[in-house]
Image (cartoon, rainbow, N blue to C red):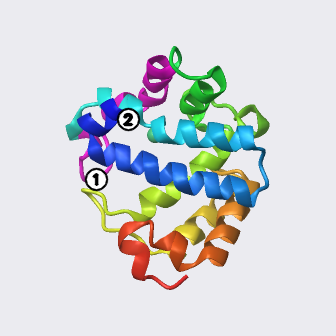
Amino acid sequence: MRVLAGTDPELAEHGLRTARLARRVGVELRMTRAELDRIEASARLHDIGKLFVAKEILDKPGPPTAGEWVELRRHPRIGFELVRRHVASEVARVVLTHHERYDGTGYPSRLSTSEIPIEARVLQVADAFDAMTSVRPYQPAMSVGYALEELTRYAGTQFDPVAVSGIVRLVEKGGRSVASSHGAASEVAV
Ligand SMILES: [Fe+2]
């Protein structure tokens, strides 16, 4: 984690915010302590493989080319290879599967529903929420309300519906306290 913070602070910050949020979603879903610890550890590291993807591709405005997609899609497996010797195998597996989709159309292995670790399914909604509500080089922050609508729209296809219901309940209950840890979204009423 220190290496990540020193090399790419923005990536490290995204990991930390996602870890905090994902753990809170897990608590909302009454997950076990062991599951919560795995969610937090894997969320911090989930995008570490992006350190090996060209910065121009990561920061590019607009959609990537087909070749750039191939590069981008390597990051879960690169991350898995980087962390597997240093963390529990269940945590490494969450890093590997964080871009699988509930409907089986994700990558790298097209896993679906319960084939995807529950920790990864919870991490995915927190990851997407943080991505949408943070300012990125190529897009302004979206509102918290819009982010929740998007997650709900893709419940059952991209995301586990149970994980989506968990983050929606958490944000609706937590209101500003959840939103305020998400940068520009802090002024948006939930
Ligand atoms: Fe990722």
Q: Is residue 54 left or right of residue 16?
A: left
Question: In terms of image quadrants, where is residue 37?
Answer: top right
Q: Secondary structure at mark 1?
A: loop
Q: Residues within 10 Å of mark 2 (few under 14, many from 20)?
A: few
Above/below status of 186 relative to 81: below
Q: Is residue 94 left or right of residue 68?
A: right
Above/below status of 168 relative to 58: below
Q: CA distance from mark 2 to mark 1?
A: 12 Å
- Quadrant location of the C terminus in the rendered image: bottom right
Above/below status of 178 relative to 87: below
Of the pair 183 and 109, the residue shown nearer to us? 183
Residue at image mark 2: 69
Q: Residues within 10 Å of mark 1 (few under 14, many from 20)?
A: few
Residue at 46 percent of width and 58 percent of height:
130
Which amino acid, mark 1? Gly
| Predominant secondary structure, magenta span | helix
In the rendered image, residue 135, in percent from the top left (x then y), is placed at: 32, 63
Residue at image mark 1: 62
Which stretch did the figure color magenta? 57-83
In the rendered image, residue 142, in percent from the top left (x then y), is placed at: 41, 71
Q: Secondary structure at mark 2?
A: helix
Does the segment drawn in magenta span residue 123?
no
